[in-house]
Image: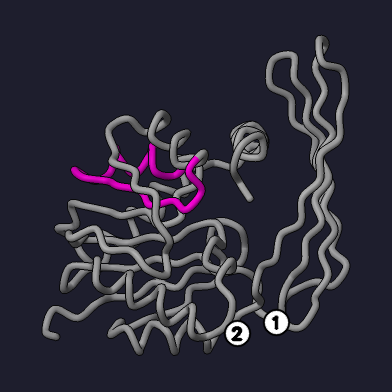
Amino acid sequence: MYDGEFAEIYELFYTNRGKDHAREAADVAALVRERCPGASSLLDVACGTGAHLRHFTGHFARAEGLELAEDMAAIAARRAPGARVTVGDMRDFALGRRFSAVTCMFSSIAHLSGQAELDAAFACFARHTEPGGVLVVEPWWFPETFIEGYVAADIVRAGERTLARVSHSVEKDGVTVIDVHYVLADPVGGARHLAERHHLTLHPREGYERAAARAGYQARYLEGGPSGRGLFVAILPAAR
C-alpha cells in the first residue's frame, strides 16, 4: 500500500485536489505555539509525500518526517529537502531525539487496529516529545459519525494527465473498508484503471483519549479540524 505507482497517484491526486496543506500546516503551528510558545522543532509522523512537512519547515527551525512506505518517504524527502525523513512504523520507532511538537495528520492514525496499537503509537509519540511539548493527532471518523455506504468522487488534472477517483466506504467489525477506483489518462498512454482497498479503524473518541492518558499526555479534543474530523491536541507535562 502506498508504494510504487500508488505513491505517485496519491501525490498526483492530493497535490491537485485543492487541499490547502500550507494553511493546515500554519493552523497546526499556531495551535502548537499557543500551548508551547518556544516550540522550535516538529516531527510529522506518517508524513506521506511531505505535503504538510514541506510547510512545517517554514514554521519550525527543525522539522522531520517519519513514513512507513518507502516510496512515499522518498517523495517527501524530495519535496521537503530541508527536512530529514526516516522510514519507520509509528507503533515502534526510536529516533533518539525529542521534538517540541509531534503531529500525525490526515487520519493516518486509523491505519492502526485496536487499543493496543493506539497505545503503542502514543507511547512512541511521548518518547519523542519534549517535556512541555505538544502532540496533534487528526483522527478518522468515530463509530457514531461514520456514514455507511459513503461515496466520494473527484477528478483532477495536472498538465496533460487526468485522474478520476471514486471510492465507496462500508463498516465491517468496527473498521471502515474503502474500495478506491482510479482511471488515469494521458494523450500517450490512453486510459487505464487501477484499484485498491483500505482498512481504517473506527476508533472511538475515548480510545484516543485513553491512549493519550496512558502515554502521559493531557489531551483535549477540538471539533472541526482540517477535514471536519476534529483534532486531538495534547500536552506532555514538563514535570514527569
Report helix, strand or loop for mark 1. loop
From the top left corner, tell me how far across and down residue 141 is, in percent.
65, 72
Count residues near mark 1 (Cα–Cα under 10 Å), then give few for <14, some for 14-19, many for 20+: some
Picture layout, residue 24 above or below residue 110: above
Residue where numbered disc 2 is placed: 204
First in sequence: mark 1 vs mark 2: 1
Picture layout, residue 111 above or below residue 155: below
From the top left corner, tell me how far across and down residue 114 is, in percent.
57, 82
Residue 87 - label: none
Q: Amino acid at mark 2?
A: Pro
From the top left corner, tell me how far across and down residue 129 is, in percent.
23, 67
Asked which quadrant contains residue 181, the reply is top right
- Front in this rendered view, residue 36 or 47: 47
- Front in this rendered view, residue 223 or 100: 100
Residues at discs 1 and 2 in contact (Cβ within 8 Å) = yes
Residue where numbered disc 1 is placed: 143
Q: Is residue 153 visible?
A: no
Residue 203 painted magenta? no
Q: Which span of residues is magenta-colored?
A: 51-70
Rendered-image quadrant of the C terminus: bottom left
Picture layout, residue 83 above or below residue 1: above
Asked which quadrant contains residue 84, the reply is top left
